Amino acid sequence: MRQFLLKAFVFFVAGWVIFSGLDRMLSGCFQKTNYKAIEYWSYLVKEGIDADMVFLGSSRVLNHFAPYVLDSVLSLNSYNLGIAGAHFDDMLARYRLYREKNKPPKVVLIGIDYFSLLDGVDRDKYQFYPWFHDRSFRKAVFRVTRFSLQERFLPLFRYNGVWMQVISGRGDWSLENAFRELLDLIASDGAKTIFVQPPLHESALRKRRNPVEMKEYYDSVSLSRGIAIIDHEHFSFSGDTSFFVDALHMNRCGAEVFTDSLAHDLMRLGLLN
């Protein structure tokens, strides 16, 4: 019996070592994929960015905020931390990881809308998987994003059944608490927070859920924390489809026009002083 247990233990350890090695190899391969959600984490994990200003938000921030336009107007070094499908817990994880690798920014622009606090939306968890072996990533992400014990500790388990999804693409929590924690963390870094409501096409404006209630919520957060809100939801071209790829997202031309207007708003309102 004793010899059997010893053999079983050796077999288990050998299997763990082999599968852990395969897990690391697979994660390394997926880190190099052109799957966009993984690419965004790749830049954040590996690069020293050290921006003066960062943008946090969902795909609407990712697509609408053009750093090169804002930098040319304000003579800043800005960086877009937006990511598709992000809610406030995702933004908190992104910001935590950013500050693990970089000095804190001076200004954080947060894109607020009527989707960042909504439950019941599928999340793309596959974008996180390749970085489980990175200590800074684990420290930033695990505390705000839920993964099962099997996903965290069982080699290769998290990749079960998702091979094609990771290569080609798709994926709730206490979102309000994460929002408050994010704002507290930014304040503790001595950075200024500014809320920005990016444009929506008028067809999307008509379909919003509880717009008055959500506006009152963001207004109350803004008032209690002394955070300015720049509201461009009803932008000058919100009815012009030539500036949008769909009802929620602008094309490059729309993003450049919007970002230029945003940069001049920041100057005119003296929000960067």
Image: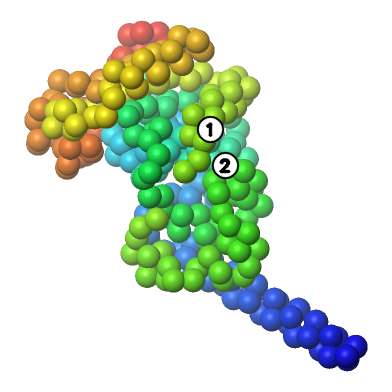
Decide: is 12 above or below 262: below
| Secondary structure state at the residue bearing disc 1 | helix
Quadrant containing the N terminus in the rendered view: bottom right
Spot occupied by residue 246 in the image (x, y as percentages of width and height)? 17, 41
Decide: is 179 above or below 252: above
Binning the other alpha carbons within 10 Å of mark 1 as few (below 14), some (14 to 19) or many (20 upward) gives many
Q: Are marks 1 and 2 in contact (CB under 8 Å)?
A: yes
| Secondary structure state at the residue bearing disc 2 | loop
The tag earlier along the polypeptide, 1 or 2, is 2
Q: Based on the displayed image, in which of its 4 quarters is residue 171 positioned?
A: bottom left
Q: Residue at x 52, y 36 (%)?
A: 174
CA distance for labels 1 and 2: 7 Å
Q: Would residue 267 appear left or right of 224 to someone viewing this image?
A: left
Q: Would residue 146 appear left or right of 253 to someone viewing this image?
A: right
Q: Which mark is residue 144?
A: 2
What residue is shown with label 1?
Answer: 178
Spot occupied by residue 221 in the image (x, y as percentages of width and height)? 46, 16
Q: Nearer the viewer, residue 235 or 270?
A: 235
Spot occupied by residue 56 in the image (x, y as percentages of width and height)? 43, 33
Residue type at mark 2 is Val
Q: Based on the displayed image, in which of its 4 quarters is residue 191 positioned?
A: top right
Q: Nearer the viewer, residue 134 or 226?
A: 226
Q: Is residue 244 visible?
A: yes
Binning the other alpha carbons within 10 Å of mark 2 as few (below 14), some (14 to 19) or many (20 upward) gives some
Residue type at mark 1 is Ala
